[in-house]
Amino acid sequence: MLARHRTARDDALVNRSRPEADLSPQMLLSAYAQGAFPMADPETGRVDYFTCDPRAIFEPATWQPGERLARTIRNGPFEVRIDSAFEAVVTACATDRSNENRSWIAERIRSAFHDLHELGLAHSVEAWVGDRLAGGLYGVALGGAFVGESMFTVREPWARDASKVAFAALMRRLGRRGFTLVDSQYANPHVLALGAVEIPFDRYLERLHAAIALDVDFD
């Protein structure tokens, strides 16, 4: 899900001879159902659809927070909210953080996810400290699959581990509602430390199609 590094594109499959990606809600949902996801080139803003093999996933039914994160959830200052600041979460995730990890969330992608949110398909999970948004994540729910897109934490001591708390709340929610798959797309040290595992793309598609067929609800 969650963070993407520019070098990850070396492992992606994309054909840039085609026109730039159609980001209508119908096309986005069709792409996700086929295991593809949109990313923008940080230099040009061009958006293409990508896949990757292997695929990083989480298992909502069995996932548990580590001991340190569990203590933070129990004793930390965070209040978790759902869909109370979707646009703010996407904006924070889209902010460039360094020259090495520049944002892949172009304005067209932000607009497309706004449309999906308005349709009730894209959701945010947020960690708040009082009236301050400390961190969060967003993604798309398709049947019993949740495609995680990005997450962020405010770079202040009071916000430490906010995105991890939001992620734990997401996993708890999905597990209780019968979701069977969380797609993290590319593996990186952050998601692997959170408990992601890698599976072959063909196996991922099998899991994805079975999850999409489930009659479950995010809300």
Image: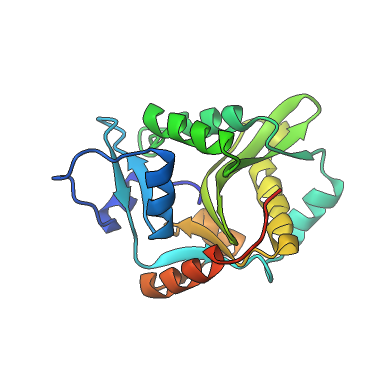
Q: Is 38 situated left or right of 46 in this image? A: right
Which residue is more in the foreground, 142 or 12? 142
Which residue is more in the foreground, 28 or 91? 28
Kindly indicate the quadrant of the structure image that contains residue 181. Answer: bottom right
Q: Is 33 situated left or right of 47 in this image? A: right
Q: Can residue 18 be seen in this view?
A: yes
By what rule are the colours in the image chosen?
A: rainbow
Kindly indicate the quadrant of the structure image that contains residue 18. Answer: top left
Q: Where is residue 140 in the image (x, y as percent from the top left)?
A: 54, 48
> Which residue is at a point 64% across and 43% down the rendered structure image?
163
Q: Position of residue 83 (x, y in %)?
A: 68, 36
Name the residue furthest right. Answer: 75
Which residue is more in the foreground, 132 or 20? 20
Name the residue furthest left. Answer: 17
Which residue is more in the foreground, 24 or 85? 24
Q: Where is residue 186 in the image (x, y as percent from the top left)?
A: 42, 57
Q: Is residue 96 visible?
A: no
Kindly indicate the quadrant of the structure image that contains residue 130. Answer: top right
> Which residue is at a point 65% across and 65% down the rendered structure image?
60
| Count of marks, rendered view | 0
Q: Position of residue 20 (x, y in %)?
A: 24, 38
> Which residue is at a point 39% across and 60% down the rendered structure image?
35
Name the residue furthest top. Answer: 131
> Which residue is at a point 75% across and 57% down the rendered structure image?
68
Above or below for 56 versus 161: below
